């Protein structure tokens, strides 16, 4: 929100940019994955009602916690690429700073260099 309010310029310290990206993308992945897991659970409840009827209890709670932990692990590990990219650099120069590599999504460009 701070970036949008500042005219799409990052007004906060540079170290917070990957943290904000991580939070944004991991929340999107987590929402999608939990909705998918809920859909699978609902499908199994409708398709196999008699088989799943007697499985309410501590075993089901443990399975639910395990699935939730796996979803969190997958989403957070997938989104941790933001931090790896920040710590290891971009591995090449963009066209804006004299290189011949095209600038990709998430690449930073030196604001002092005029890309035109």
Image: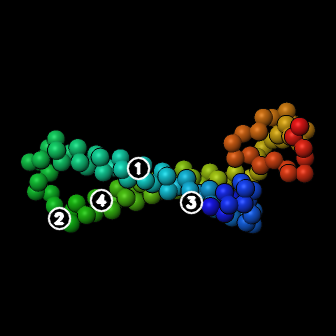
Query: What residue is shown with label 2?
Result: 57
Left or right? Give the position of 78 relative to 97: left
Residue 100: percent from left, percent from top:
85, 33
Q: Residue at x 62, y 56 (%)?
A: 21
Looking at the rendered structure, the secondary structure element under dot 2 is loop
Instruction: State the CA–CA distance, disc 1 to disc 2.
Output: 24 Å
Instruction: State the CA–CA distance, disc 1 to disc 3.
Output: 15 Å
The label nearer to you, 1 versus 4, is 1
Q: Residue at x 35, y 56 (%)?
A: 67
Query: What residue is shown with label 3?
Result: 23
Residue 20 versus residue 116 in the image, above or below? below
Q: Residue at x 78, y 34 (%)?
A: 102
The label nearer to you, 3 versus 2, is 3
For marks 1 and 2, the one nearer the N-term is 1
Residue 75 versus residue 93 in the image, above or below? below
Query: What residue is shown with label 1?
Result: 33
For marks 1 and 4, the one nearer the N-term is 1
Circles 4 and 3 in contact, beta carbons < 8 Å = no
The residue closer to the viewer here, 4 or 110, is: 4
The label nearer to you, 1 versus 2, is 1
Q: Is residue 58 visible?
A: yes
Looking at the rendered structure, the secondary structure element under dot 1 is helix
User: Where is the C terminus found, in terms of image quarters?
Assistant: top right
User: Where is the N terminus found, in terms of image quarters?
Assistant: bottom right
Q: Is residue 18 visible?
A: no
Specify few, some or many for label 1: CA neighbours under 10 Å numbering under 14, 14-19, or 20 or more.
some
Looking at the rendered structure, the secondary structure element under dot 3 is helix
Query: What residue is shown with label 4?
Result: 64
């Amino acid at each position: 929100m701070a970036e949008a309010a500042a005219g799409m310029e990052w007004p906060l310290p540079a170290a917070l940019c990957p943290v904000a990206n991580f939070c944004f993308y991991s929340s999107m992945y987590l929402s999608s994955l939990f909705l998918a897991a809920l859909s699978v659970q609902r499908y199994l409840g409708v398709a196999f009602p008699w088989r799943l009827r007697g499985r309410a209890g501590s075993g089901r709670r443990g399975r639910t916690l395990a699935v939730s932990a796996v979803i969190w692990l997958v989403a957070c590990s997938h989104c941790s690429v933001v931090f790896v990219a920040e710590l290891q650099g971009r591995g090449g120069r963009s066209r804006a700073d004299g290189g011949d590599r095209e600038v990709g999504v998430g690449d930073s460009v030196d604001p002092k260099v005029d890309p035109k």
